[in-house]
Image (cartoon, coloured by chain):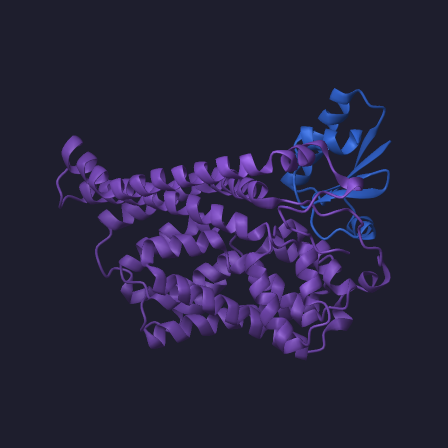
Amino acid sequence: MKIQVLGTGCAKCKALTANAERAVAELGLDASVEKVEDLREIAKFGVMTTPALAVDGEVRSAGKVLSPEAVKALLVR
Amino acid sequence: MKPPVARPDSPPSPCCCTPPAAARVASSSGRSARTALALAGALLVWLAAYAAIQPVSERIAFGLLGLGRTSHLGQSVAFFLYDAPKVLLLLGLIVFLVGIVRSFFTAERTRALLAGRRESVGNVLAALLGVVTPFCSCSAVPLFLGFVEVGIPLGVTLSFLVSAPMVNEVALVLLFGLFGWRVALLYLLTGLAVAIAAGFILGRMKLERHVEAWVYESMRRGAAFEAERLGFVGRVEKGREAVRDVVGKVWPWVLAGIAVGAGVHGYVPEGLLASFMGKSAWWSVPAAVVIGVPMYSNAAGIIPVVEALLGKGAALGTVLAFMMSVIGLSLPEIVILRKVLRPPLIAAFVGVVASGILLVGWLFNAVL
């Protein structure tokens, strides 16, 4: 499973990355959390608000800092 | 791209129901009733607290602390004890309401509303949507790309990018709380006017060739995630989130700003600033803009200071121009926009917006 956090490196993006990492650790998933900071790469996902979260290349959330619990809910369904 | 569907009674589609959403729908009527009750209770507490500020603050300053009503220290302390809770209460209420309003507007929905609009109508609509759409300057570029992608004209996009930071709900609340509704309304209307006019003029200037070339090459792949369904309880939760987020972040600035304001209120003599920030000094408006543009502060920190300046004889137009250039145009946002806009366009953008602010300042100084 590949988890990507899309954001240019503002405080909210860092918070989302940390929450995603915590969710992965708590679920014991074999998944990598990767930060996508390049604007062109972010544009390719088609999101208009950051931070956004993509799972296996598919955008699942945009424009907010999900709590670790909310990330878990996205990952396990 | 689908606009978010926001009907509390609509069942979640089977493909996208997360467990919490499902639970929310199952007991939605009970939770709605409880939420409504909690809201009513909170409003009563708020009203009681607001009514108590004046008597309590005076009793503390002049009774408990025994400060003289006419002393510098007494005036400063009373000012602080009255203004700080008042502004924080107003801030909490308005941010909550704005949070709820904004839950109806996502960037995606705003884009859908703007797509295919003619320029003039589009500028007006973009400026208005800039006020209610949630916006953070770190999202300015993805938003810009998203707008350009569906063919929204450059000038319309820029109207949005001017209005979104400049017409700011925190600034509106503080202006309302400290100067009354007339000044708040003036700020809202002139802020919108600057955003509309600047976007329109920039659109006429045909600057599309100064947008970085890759902007038009990349993308064309809308994100296909489902917008969440909120309902009444979800929207109230959004409002609470906004309060936690905004008030939690700005309260130290508000207190610091009011403290500085309180010092000026008690100690700086009346009219001291009139000579160089007053109406007669025409150059004070451009000076305020030149100082304000590179400065970056949130509205919360700047306004209480501004209030104190105003009380000591600075002219309203000068002060408004200063405030608009501090929160509307900022160096960090310009640096971010540089990634998609080439320098000539950046220069035109800053120049046109700053000129608009300048005109607002002079207009107010001349009229009021």
Q: Nearer the viewer, residue B13 or B80?
A: B13
Is residue A36 visible in the rendered structure shown here? no
Q: Dividing the image into 4 quarters, which one contains the N terminus of chain B?
A: bottom right
Residue at figure coordinates x 56%, y 68% from the top left: B195
The letter of the purple chain is B
The letter of the blue chain is A
Q: Nearer the viewer, residue B344 or B80?
A: B80
Residue at figure coordinates x 35%, y 61% from the top left: B181
Residue at figure coordinates x 49%, y 69% from the top left: B357
Q: Quadrant of residue A57?
A: top right
Q: Residue A28: image x %, image y %?
A: 80, 20
Q: Nearer the viewer, residue B219 or B307?
A: B219
Image height of B103 relative to B111, above or below = above
Q: Dividing the image into 4 quarters, which one contains the C terminus of chain B?
A: bottom left
Residue at figure coordinates x 64%, y 40% from the top left: A12
Q: Residue B227: image x %, image y %?
A: 71, 48
Is residue B349 visible in the rendered structure shown here? yes
Image height of B192 relative to B119, above or below = above
Q: Is residue B60 left or right of residue B12?
A: left
Q: Residue B121: image x %, image y %?
A: 62, 75
